[in-house]
Image: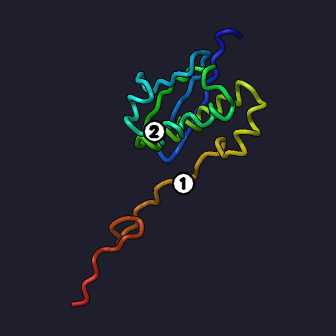
Amino acid sequence: MADKEFIATGRRKTSIAVVKLVKGKGRIFVNGKKLTDYIGNRPAIEMLVYRPLVLTDNQEKYDVRVKAVGGGIVAQCGAIRHGIARALVKSNEEYRNVLRLEGLLTRDPRVKERKKYGRKRARKRFQFSKR
């Protein structure tokens, strides 16, 4: 059980992140790049990703390897956070309550509403001309 890895899938909007949790020094790699290089200079999003590790006090214990596809950077980071939380529960069932209370195990159901016919977008109308 020394080199055991925990694999979980996280989702957000149209993004999917496959997360591998491996014993390590607390580094996160997304699609082969370091997290900071992948998301650029966005400390708020970086904190969002590290949240499950901070809550369970595992920042320095695991390396995280992620394959993220679909959506934008922020949605992918939400998917990564969801995947990390699920992988942590696989590693230790005692983390479930802590992560559940913070809402990290719940998949965010909000997705973009579909475009309707006769409209510009889902709800926006075409410009109305009285005369």
In depth, the one of 109 and 29 nearer the eye is 29
Q: Residues within 10 Å of mark 2 (few under 14, many from 20)?
A: few
Q: Quadrant of residue 50?
A: top right
View extreme (top): residue: 2
Residue under label 1: 110
Amino acid at the residue labelled 1: Arg
In depth, the one of 38 and 89 nearer the eye is 38
Q: Residue at x 60, y 31 (%)?
A: 84
View extreme (left): residue: 131
**Left or right of 34, for residue 49:** right
Q: Residue at x 49, y 36 (%)?
A: 46
Quadrant where the N terminus sits is: top right
- Asked if 122 appears above or below 1 in the picture, the reply is below
Mark 1 secondary-structure assignment: loop
Residue under label 2: 43
Amino acid at the residue labelled 2: Pro
In depth, the one of 131 and 59 nearer the eye is 59
Q: Please identify, in this view, whether the residue under mark 2 or under mark 1 is nearer the observer.
A: 2
CA separation, marks 2 and 1? 23 Å
**Left or right of 85, for residue 28:** left
Which label sits on residue 41? Answer: none
| Rendering coords of residue 30 (x, y %) | 45, 27
| Rendering coords of residue 131 (x, y %) | 21, 90
- Asked if 71 appears above or below 119 in the picture, the reply is above
Q: Residue at x 70, y 27 (%)?
A: 90
**Left or right of 125, for residue 112:** right
Mark 2 secondary-structure assignment: helix
Dot placed on the residue nearer the N-terminal end, 2 or 1? 2
Q: Are marks 2 and 1 in contact (CB under 8 Å)?
A: no
| Rendering coords of residue 95 (x, y %) | 74, 33
